[in-house]
Image: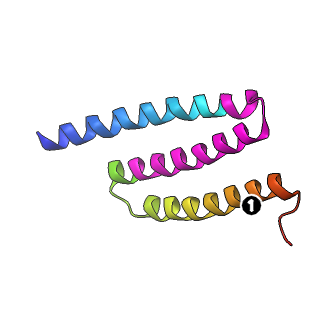
Amino acid sequence: MSIIILFTAVSIAKVLLALSMMLVVVRIFIGPRAQDRIVALDASYIIAMLLLVTFGIGSGRTVYFEAALVIGLLGFVSTVALAKFLMRGEVIE
């Protein structure tokens, strides 16, 4: 019984995360300002990380968790670099 509940919850989470990823992609392309696009990019890497975690839970393989960790680290660094670029116009001082 609990395996069925887990499979259903993971499937629902995958569908909802895919739907939210589509909405974020729309915001990236339509966003009126660069700040909106950066926030949408930040949300997209978080959603991608969560999708990988749900794939890892569903399959039971650890490679998805490691990939999610790498995406989380690189996404944070890229968001900070883009925000700094928007503030000052240069990334490396």
Q: At 66% from the left edge and 63% from the top edge, which residue is drawn? A: 77
Q: Is residue 21 left or right of residue 25?
A: left
The answer to which image quadrant residue 12 occupies is top left
Q: Is residue 91 left or right of residue 56?
A: right
The residue sitting at the left extreme is 1
- Determine the residue positioned at 69% across, 60% down: 80
In the picture of the structure, the residue carrying the numbered disc 1 is 81
Where does the magenta region start and end? 26-55
Please name the residue shown 68% across and 55% down the image: 79
Question: Does 68 sit above or below residue 20?
Answer: below
**Rendered residue at 78%/34% (across/down):** 33
Q: Nearer the viewer, residue 28 or 10?
A: 28
Q: Quadrant of residue 41?
A: top right
Which amino acid lies under the numbered mark 1 shown in the image of this protein?
A: Ala
Relative placement, left or right, of 8 versus 16 is: left
Assign a secondary structure to mark 1. helix
Q: Quadrant of the N terminus?
A: top left
Residue 31 against residue 83 in the figure, above or below:
above
Q: Is residue 42 left or right of residue 49?
A: right
Please name the predominant secondary structure of the magenta segment in the image.
Answer: helix
Magenta stretch: residue 33 in it? yes
Tell me residue 32's x, y (percent).
Answer: 77, 29
